[in-house]
Amino acid sequence: TTKEDLRQSYPFEMMAVPMEQVARIHASSGTTGKPTVVGYTQKDVDNWAHLVARSIRASGGRPGDRIHVAYGYGLFTGGLGAHYGAEALG
């Protein structure tokens, strides 16, 4: 799947699961065209949190540490992934 595929199917025509299973929707800002919309199931979010938590731990983070997430909290995916990972780490 390419970014162009997602843009041409804007906003929800390329979801891999029924919309009832989509727990989160993230999108690009659309500054270069239509926004790129991506849906995540709860399992996707849980897996993502676990992977980011492992990454934080591998770089020295430990449960109880304070982590500053400097990304925006709009529909941009990066900030939320870092947030979920920090929460999962504890």
Image: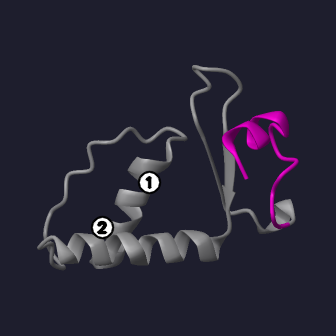
As shown in the figure, which amino acid type bears the numbered disc 1?
A: Leu
Query: Circle 2: is it few (<14), some (14-19), or many (20+) Cα within 10 Å?
Result: many
Q: Nearer the viewer, residue 60 or 46?
A: 60
Quarter of the rendering containing residue 10: top right
Give the residue pinned by disc 1.
80
Q: Position of residue 60 (x, y in %)?
A: 11, 73
Quarter of the rendering containing residue 17: bottom right
Q: From the viewer's perspective, is 49 left or right of 25?
A: left
Q: Taking 2 as reference, is 84 above or below it?
A: below
> Residue at coordinates 15% horizontally, 63% vertically from top-left?
66
Which region shows up in magenta? 1-17
- Chief secondary structure of the magenta portion: loop
> Residue at coordinates 85% horizontally, 40% vertically from top-left?
9
* In contact (CB < 8 Å): disc 1 and disc 2: no
Q: Which is more N-terminal, label 2 or label 1?
A: 1
Q: From the viewer's perspective, is 39 left or right of 17?
A: left
- Secondary element at tag 1: helix
Q: From the viewer's perspective, is 49 left or right of 43?
A: left
Residue 5 highlighted magenta (yes or no): yes
Give the residue pinned by disc 2.
86
Total numbered labels = 2
Q: Nearer the viewer, residue 25 or 56?
A: 56
Q: Position of residue 74 (x, y in %)?
A: 49, 38
Q: Position of residue 43 (x, y in %)?
A: 62, 77
Quarter of the rendering containing residue 54: bottom left
- Secondary element at tag 2: helix
As shown in the figure, which amino acid type bears the numbered disc 2?
A: Ala
The quarter of the image holding the C terminus is bottom left
Q: Taking 75 as reference, is 52 above or below it?
A: below
